[in-house]
Amino acid sequence: MILTYEITATLAPELVSRYEDYMRRHHIPALLATGCFKAARFSRAAPGEYRMRYEAPDRATLERYLAEHAPGLRAEFDAEFPSGVALTRTIWETIQEWS
């Protein structure tokens, strides 16, 4: 069963450009380098409103990411953006997929 780890971010307007650059050049590549996810999507609804979706092959792999890698990546993110960013995190289980 594929799991999607989804993070939404709402940013202060002055952080938008720096945030997009940081996510594209550092955070998402570092997250994929953990080997825990097979795909990533970075989307924008409007300037300052973002969604990241990471696909994990199974719950054990996602749990390994959350235990072993997430704390360090979150600490790096918090150091880069100590304020002005509100995040939510949700884990979605795929019930069925069509293409």
Image (spheres, rainbow, N blue to C red):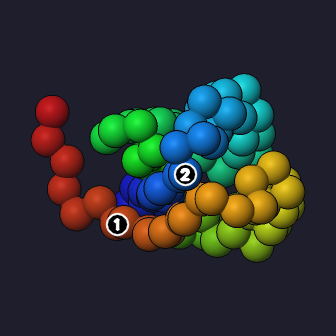
Residue 67: x, y in percent? 76, 73
The residue type indicated by label 2 comes to Ala
Query: Can you tell which mark lies on residue 63?
Result: none
* Disc on res. 93: 1
From the image, tell me which residue sits under label 2.
12
* Left or right of 70, for residue 10: left
What residue is rendered at 52% in x and 43% in y? 13
Q: Indicate the amino acid at tag 1.
A: Glu
In the displayed structure, would residue 93 be above or below residue 52?
below
Q: Marks 2/1: CA distance? A: 31 Å
Q: Which residue is painted at 85% across and 57% down in the image?
A: 79
Which percent across, then down, holds residue 63?
64, 71
Q: Is residue 70 left or right of residue 56?
A: right
Whole-percent x and y of residue 25? 72, 26
Q: Residue furthest front?
A: 14
Which image quadrant: the C terminus? Answer: top left
Q: Neighbour class for label 1 at 10 Å: few (<14), some, many (≥20)?
A: some
Can you say whether 4 is above or below 87 in the image? above
Dot placed on the residue nearer the N-terminal end, 2 or 1:
2
